[in-house]
Image: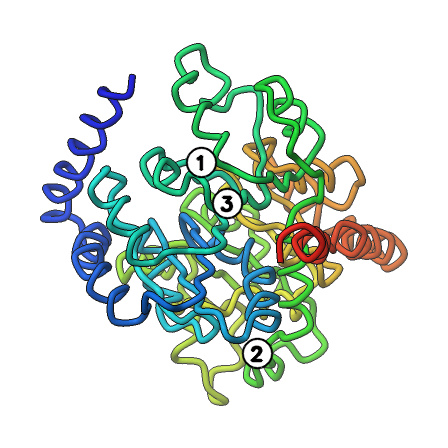
Amino acid sequence: MAVIYQIFIHIFGFITKIYSLFNSKVRLMVKGRKESFIILKEKIKPEDRVIWFHCASLGEFEQGRVLLEMFRKQEQDAKIVLTFFSPSGYEIRKNYPYADCIIYLPNDTKRNAEHFIQLANPQLTFFIKYEFWYNYLYFLSGRKVFQVSLILRKDHYLQKFYSGYFRKQLKVFNHFFVQNRETADILLKFGYTNASIVGDTRFDRVMQIAEQTTYIPLISQWCKDEKVLILGSSWEADEQLLYASKLASELKVIIVPHNISEGHIEYIKTLFADSVLFTQLNETNLNTNLIIVNTVGLLSSLYRYCQWAYIGGGFGEGIHNTLEAACFGKPVCFGTNYKKFKEAVDLVQLEGAKVITSPDDLRTFVNDLSVETKYEKVSFTCQNYVKDNAGASKRIMNYLKQEVL
């Protein structure tokens, strides 16, 4: 299995380079990886005390962000190295001010992993959620390595019969900070007792976002005292469902598409002919009923302006972040593919969220929550759920202060 993995990782790197010829995002990743060692060597010196955070993408970065910023305050003389696997993380956060060195993680070959660990020489390493790169972990052996917000399910590849080779890499971790009991039990089955159930650090981040939310004057002016429905991180199926529901002719609606390419924005405009792009919004066209947000980074702040939040992705690979809306006390709804997300399952059980299967379901969701008393009850449920589950980052930091720092 070891030989197969080493062959696979080289083939993966080769295929990625070929694919980059046809895909602009992958091209950014390939180009960025070529520069990683150069940047690392420029930013990090052998005498530096280095704390390394690795995140696959933007979602994992947001999940580990509060903990990273706690370290920034706690260890002001340390250098923080932040690595990403995906362009969707790196390209958006490459200028993040609280890290000293932000780069793509080089492909997990033995040569790359050994060179990276030699240059970075991390005293503390944190992998967010479930990043298991075999060669990097091999060369981190004997150092202080932690897994943050780990969640494992019964269908995770580490549970498969062929994964004994990969499970051995878990011995490198000093401690696992896990989200739930199921994950701790799976680790125990593997023979690992060094796990603490601390919860999900994403709750801390959405609480932070709610406190630091950006005020958007034109949106505030556009909303006035009227009720607004937001489609957050919507896909084509979500936009079609909204169109079929005819709610866009009755309510004010903000669509924040997952894909903001010119082609997809034009597609949404064909569905909603009277819509206005956010970048073209001004005081002369505030009479529109529907705004299409054609820029990134605003969704978490926009939720404060809505009454109802439809979370996209539920008719595809899976829903996006429900917590960003719930932390503002906004009732949420989404499509049927949500069961891999514990917070969504919890909110459905608590009646803070509704599963949508048709345009009529969306209309019912909006109409039912137009009753003030019912809306207040659901709003309270959503907001309290987030508050009750916050604090994981602080629990992790307290453990590290007692046992490691």
The numbered mark, 2 or 3, whose residue comes first in the sequence reads 3
Q: Is residue 331 visible?
A: no
Nearer to the camera, 386 or 391: 391
Residue shown at the point (48%, 72%) measured from the top left: 98
Placement of the N terminus among the 4 image quadrants: top left
Secondary structure of the residue carrying numbered label 1? loop
| Residue 351, percent from left and from top | 79, 41
Residue 245, placed above or below residue 138: below
- The circle drawn on residue 317 is 1
Q: Quadrant of residue 316?
A: top left
Q: For residue 337, which quarter of the picture? A: top right
Q: Whole-percent x and y of residue 179?
A: 66, 39
Please state which of residues 192 and 312 is positioned toward the viewer in this rendering.
Answer: 192
Q: Secondary structure at mark 3?
A: strand
The numbered disc on residue 343 is: none
Give percent across and percent down for residue 387. 78, 56
Which one is in front in this view, the residue at disc 3 or the one at disc 1? 3
Residue 219 disc label = 2
Disc 1 to disc 2, how far (Cα)? 30 Å
Q: Please identify, in this view, whether the residue under mark 2 or under mark 3 is nearer the observer.
A: 3
Residues at marks 1 and 2 touching, judged by CB atoms closer than 8 Å: no
Category of crowding for the residue at label 1, using alpha-carbon neighbours closer than 10 angstroms: few (below 14), some (14–19), many (at least 20): few
